[in-house]
Amino acid sequence: MKFLLITVCMFTMAFFFDPWTPLVFWIGVLLLQLLFSHINWKKWFLFMLPFFITAFGYFWTTLVFAEAQSGTVIWTLGRLEITVSQLDHALSLSFRVLAFSSLSLLFALTTNPVTFILSLMQQLKLSPKIAYGVMVGYQFLPVLKDEFVQIGQAQRLRGVAREKNALQRLLGIRRVLIPMLAGAVRKAERAAFAMEARGFIGERRSSYYHVISIGKVDLAMSVMFLFVLILSCTNHLWFGLY
């Protein structure tokens, strides 16, 4: 349900080009996170930092490099004249980046990946072949990270010199990636054999050991999300913004 709600919110925000709608929606998402989630805000800020920089980049480049716009000039910097419409477009793009990134982070930081895949399989009828394939691939990510470090250390023990500059290090990654990917293929093959040995043939089950159901908390959060979305889309009625 959370995935569908976030998808609906993103599609809806894509059709609003004024700066106030994404701003109100971004503030609403932040309030929901602040009041009803237990996320690590230090981690949240670190993840959001690139998006803050991107939003500022959109804001500045839209002001400086946008086509000449007619309208009231509100700011002059040398030959650069900023009109009201340019400022609105710049703010709209920036707030949209912040709103979308906050929504994505809210989903990523408050969702258990295994529960999400099970929910897709049970409620949206995702094929078990795709669902279990994604789940196994996700479980392999920490293993691949450890293997990347171990293969690099093993190569250095065998006398492979550490590259001096960043370009050489980047090109030298292939010496680690090739054996790592070969090992990943062998692991994937063993996992597939193990699943087939336990009776997995890719058919949809009629019952599950871990049933994912929609509860009252999900419905309450859905109502709050829809309230924030509707409030954002109708901000001109409530706040007189426009």
Image: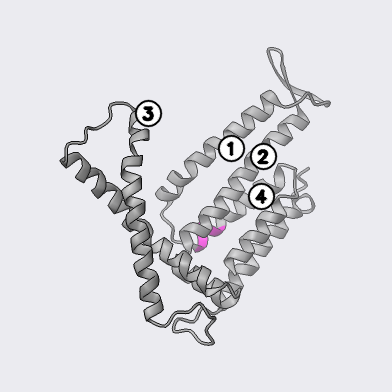
Residue that carries the numbered disc 3 in the rendered image: 167
Q: In the drawing, does residue 170 fall left or right of residue 123?
A: left
Q: Residues within 10 Å of mark 3 (few under 14, many from 20)?
A: few
Three-letter code for the amino acid on which mark 3 is drawn: Leu
Instruction: Look at label 2 and name its amino acid.
Output: Leu
Point 62% across, 28% down: residue? 60
**Residue type, mark 1 in image:** Ala
Measure the alpha-carbon separation of dots 4 and 1: 16 Å
* Label 4 vs label 1, nearer the camera: 1
- Pick whichever of labels 1 and 2 is earlier in the sequence: 1
The residue indicated by pointer 2 is 93
Q: Is residue 34 magenta?
A: yes
Mark 1 lies on residue: 55
- In terms of sequence position, does the residue under pointer 2 or pointer 3 come before the other? 2
Circle 4 is placed at which residue position? 24
**Does the CB distance between marks 1 and 2 fall below 8 Å?**
yes
The circle on residue 176 is: none
